[in-house]
Image (spheres, rainbow, N blue to C red):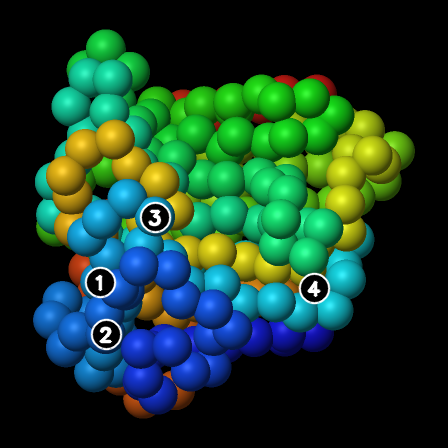
Amino acid sequence: MSLFVDGFELGDVPPWDASFGTPTRVNAPVNSGLWSLETNANGEALSKSFALQTTLYVRWFFRVATLPAAGEELVLGGIYGNTAASPICRLYLRNDAGTQVLRLRRTYPADLGLDFNSAILADTWYCVEIRFVKNINGAYEVWLEEFQVIVEDPVDTSAAFDADTFYVGQLASNYAVINYSDDVEVNTGRITCVLAGPGVGGGTHYMIAMNKILLGG
């Protein structure tokens, strides 16, 4: 069941619930349609709250103007609980000693980064989807351009809060970067990178054959 869909065609904040910093709607670059979201400072983000969920999928498209250098990182989005106050998992783009890494940092059952050595390029749109399941046999999963690149399943996430909020933009960063977000969806089932509606196909996506990280599978 779809809980929320937005391609930033309706304005900077609506239909989002909260805005942090000055995230801005721009007409270039876009993944689809006429608009996307630009964030260019640490902490700039939008958030959307929804009814409590124990199984959640979030999908969006991201693009960065500048890749992080060694030791630098950017938080692109995250699933939160406890009325948006407590992170459940967050997606990072970081540089580990010269390697571009996509990191899912999960909080339950303990703080841990699940890494995938990616071939992310600057100025390129990418589709990413995260799955979270709260259960004694719970799960975290990440798809990049429809490739399953991170999976931790099963893992005991029963102590986690129910998911109630999604953040997107530049939740945190330790370097100067402009990044873009587009075509966000929050759902209780798998979403995929397929878009429906006018303006679809405005972005270029790279289907990258990559090594997967398999934990607990």
Left or right position of 116 against 159: left
Element type at mark 1: strand
Residue 193 image point, x, y percent:
43, 62
Identify the amino acid type marked 4: Thr
Say how many tags the image has: 4
Residue at left 64%, top 43%? 86
Name which quarter of the figure residue 9 lies in.
bottom left
The amino acid type of the residue labelled 2 equals Arg
- Element assignment for label 2: strand
Percent position (x, y) of residue 52? 77, 62
At which x and y percent is residue 2?
63, 75
**Which residue is depicted at the point 44% across and 49% down?**
77
Q: CA distance from mark 2 to mark 1?
A: 6 Å
Label 1 or label 3, whichever lies nearer to me, is 3
**Which-is-in-front pick, marks 4 and 1?**
1
Per the model, the C-alpha gap separating discs 1 and 3 is 12 Å
* Label whose residue precedes the other's in the sequence (4 or 1): 1
Q: Which mark is residue 25?
A: 2
Q: Position of residue 39 (x, y in %)?
A: 24, 57
| Along the viewing direction, whichever of 68 and 175 lies nearer the viewer | 175
Q: Amino acid at mark 3?
A: Gly
For marks 4 and 2, give the CA distance.
27 Å
Looking at the figure, which quarter contains the N terminus?
A: bottom right
Do labels 2 and 1 touch, CB within 8 Å? yes
In the picture of the structure, the residue carrying the numbered disc 4 is: 188
Report the residue that reaches farthest toward the front: 21
Q: CA distance from mark 4 to mark 1?
A: 27 Å
- Tell me which amino acid carries mark 1: Glu
Contact (Cβ within 8 Å) of mark 4 with mark 3: no
